Image (cartoon, coloured by chain):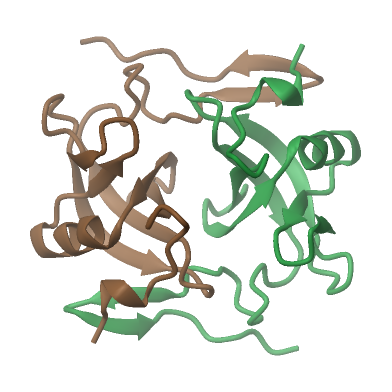
Chain colours: A green, B brown
Amino acid sequence: MFDPASLKYDAHGLVPAIAQDHATGEVLMMAWMNAEAVAKTLATGKVTYWSRSRQNFWVKGESSGHVQKLVDFRLDCDRDCLLVLVEQTGPACHTNRRSCFYTSVRDGDEVELMAPEAG
Amino acid sequence: MFDPASLKYDAHGLVPAIAQDHATGEVLMMAWMNAEAVAKTLATGKVTYWSRSRQNFWVKGESSGHVQKLVDFRLDCDRDCLLVLVEQTGPACHTNRRSCFYTSVRDGDEVELMAPEAG
């Protein structure tokens, strides 16, 4: 039986959660969860983070429509990092790009790998 | 021109770095880098973290041989999380599993997805 309290949270009661597209393997974003966000994510199947800036739950896509449907919920060997495999509707990034990791460092320069989606 | 100082570090001077297998897309592990570890990773092509427990640089695989050769170095929209695409030699996890994310939560129970590799 999995207990969200069994995870190792940082001093703010948070663990990093990596969201990965379950079909393509693309890493979409990283955000944070507290124990209650973990419980909500598992109970609802809607990936729910804790917003550090708003100090509130953040049901991903609740306002934008760019929801993340939970496909698989994983934890790492140290129980201090999560990997959520998701079905991502629309772009994951607030810049309207598919992934937040759209900048690469190549030969010392920053290169933009993807453009914002139309919409 | 990319400057490691342009990243947003936490109160401990660290950013989370997600390591992903460049060929399979598998998320292997998450660890931390400080500005100097970022610079070392880019300069050497050997993924180098900062060990919070040992308070020292951690050239991944230096003792185990399970090195990570940098293939692409990415940062996210907020510049506070890194994604390193790597060529992973051997298992990434200290438990000898390919990935640290070998535990899944399914129907409320923890399920082990992969066994340690022989060796």
User: In the displayed structure, would residue B35 be above or below residue B116?
Assistant: below
Left-right relation of A38 to A91 = right
Quarter of the image with the N terminus of chain B is bottom left
Find residue A117 and report its image quarter.
Answer: bottom right
> Is residue B21 in view from this perspective?
no
In the image, B57 versus A71, the foreground residue is: B57
Q: Position of residue B40 (x, y in %)?
A: 15, 58
Left-right relation of B27 to A83 = left
Picture residue at 75% right of the left edge, 52% below the top? A50
User: In the displayed structure, would residue B40 be above or below residue A17?
Assistant: below
> Is residue A44 in view from this perspective?
yes
Left-right relation of B60 to A37 = left
Quarter of the image with the C terminus of chain B is top left
Q: Position of residue A80 (x, y in %)?
A: 54, 32
Left-right relation of A15 to B30 = right
Picture residue at 48% right of the left edge, 25% below the top? A78
Q: Position of residue A92 (x, y in %)?
A: 67, 67
Picture residue at 84% right of the left edge, 42% below the top? A45
Picture residue at 34% right of the left edge, 38% below the top? B52
